[in-house]
Amino acid sequence: MLDRVREIAAARCDGWGGTLLEMIGEPDYVHFLIALPPNLELSNFVNNLKTTTSRLVRKEFADHLASVYREPVLWSRSYCIVSGGGAPLSIITQYLEQQERPE
């Protein structure tokens, strides 16, 4: 399922003029490392990313998700955006790679 989320997210990033650099899934959230144009409205991008991934994943994995979720919702309404602020991408990528991946 995480691999499919990665595919969808990469396509959404590309469609908005950006690039998905890294994605790490954890038991209760997902980290995305994304390069986006500086003039992009981030809230619109996040809304589109979450809506698209939710719709497609819920459709493609309906049987599995039905046993886990009572409501047809994949993401919470919250999100956090952090700017790299000049930190080398290698340091940020290293942090993401150290995160736990669910089995």
Image (tube, rainbow, N blue to C red):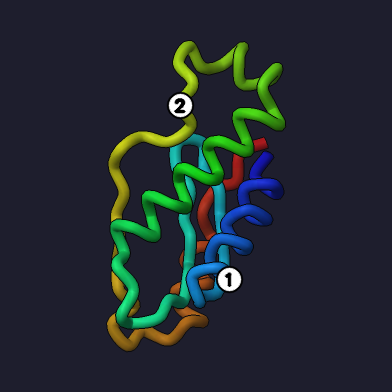
Q: Name the amino acid, label 1.
A: Asp
Look at the numbered disc 2 and give the secondary structure of its residue.
Answer: loop
Above or below for 90 versus 81: below
Q: Name the amino acid, label 2.
A: Val
Callout 2 environment at 10 Å: few (<14), some (14 to 19), or many (20+)?
few
Counting from the top left corner in percent of width and height, residue 13 is at 53, 66
Would you identify the image quadrant in which residue 63 lies? top right
The label on residue 69 is none
Counting from the top left corner in percent of width and height, residue 50 is at 45, 46
Would you identify the image quadrant in which residue 103 lies? top right
Mark 2 or mark 1: which comes first in sequence?
Answer: 1
Callout 1 environment at 10 Å: few (<14), some (14 to 19), or many (20+)?
some
Image quarter (top left, top right, bottom left or bottom right) of the N terminus: top right
Q: Are marks 2 and 1 in contact (CB under 8 Å)?
A: no
Instruction: Tell whether 5 sits left or right of 18.
Output: right
Counting from the top left corner in percent of width and height, residue 87 is at 36, 84
**Real-space CA distance between mark 2 and mark 1, rounded to the nearest whole angstrom:** 24 Å
Looking at the image, which residue is at 29% across and 54% down? 80
Looking at the image, which residue is at 37% across and 50% down? 47
Instruction: Tell whether 64 sits left or right of 48.
Output: right
The label on residue 14 is 1
Above or below for 99 versus 86: above
Counting from the top left corner in percent of width and height, residue 95 is at 47, 66
Look at the numbered disc 1 and give the secondary structure of its residue.
Answer: helix
| Residue that numbered label 2 is attached to | 73
Looking at the image, which residue is at 43% across and 36% down? 75
Instruction: Tell whether 53 sits left or right of 7.
Output: left
